[in-house]
Image (cartoon, rainbow, N blue to C red):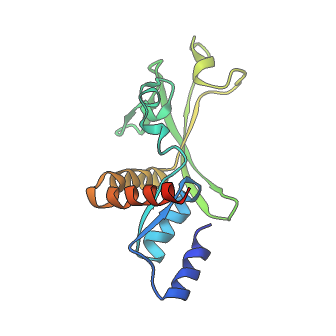
Amino acid sequence: MMIPFLNSIQETYGHLPEYILGDAGYGSESNYMAVIDNFNRTPLITYGMFIKDKTKKYKSDIFNTQNWDYDEINNEFICPNNKRIGFKRYAYRHDKYGFKRDFKLYECDDCSEYPLKHQCMNFNSKTNKKIMKNYNWEYFKAQINKKFSEPKTSTVKERLIWILFLDL
């Protein structure tokens, strides 16, 4: 976790830099929340799929639920088989640090007749397609992508890359 480290820096130096930099290992919902809410700083921390989710292959994969249409009125996703994956319930999980992450669980009513089911789901799956969405996490990812595309913060990122490169 990044929070104890940032507390230590703040205690030692009396302040934190405007931008908190970190690699994907630190890209988590809890770290983004802490940097913004507790430290009032801007996180420039990538997340695990930061590079992959920008690739053509990822964006064009019809079985990737991130690419499925979403019907806001009915709160449903629409799969490649044109089936509706509707909202079922709220759920939560705790990560290994005890941070609670909130999800919305969506589930298809019947995937049994789908000829491409084995591509859409695990090969031996005996259940229907389920999607768990953490909209808070999605919000943070969108904010990080936006920050990294801004001229001011992209310059900070480029400097960091050069510093790391020169350190090798």
Residue 158 versus residue 43 in the image, above or below: above
Q: Is residue 6 left or right of residue 69?
A: right
In the rendered view, tell whether residue 90 sits above or below residue 153.
Answer: above
User: Residue at (39%, 35%) from the top-left corner?
Assistant: 70
The answer to whether residue 151 shows anywhere in this view is yes
Tell me what residue is drawn at x 48 percent, y 66 percent. 33
Q: Is residue 111 visible?
A: no
Horizontal and vertical percent position of residue 29: 53, 59
| Residue 89: % across, % down | 56, 46
54 vs 26: above or below: above
User: Which quarter of the rendering shows the C terminus?
Assistant: bottom right
- At x 54%, y 53%, the residue is 24
Residue at 37% across, 35% down: 71
Q: State the quadrant of the N terminus.
A: bottom right
Residue extending farthest to the left is 151
Name the quadrant containing residue 124: top right
Q: Is residue 68 above or below residue 146?
A: above
Q: Where residue 6 sits: x, y (%)?
A: 54, 76
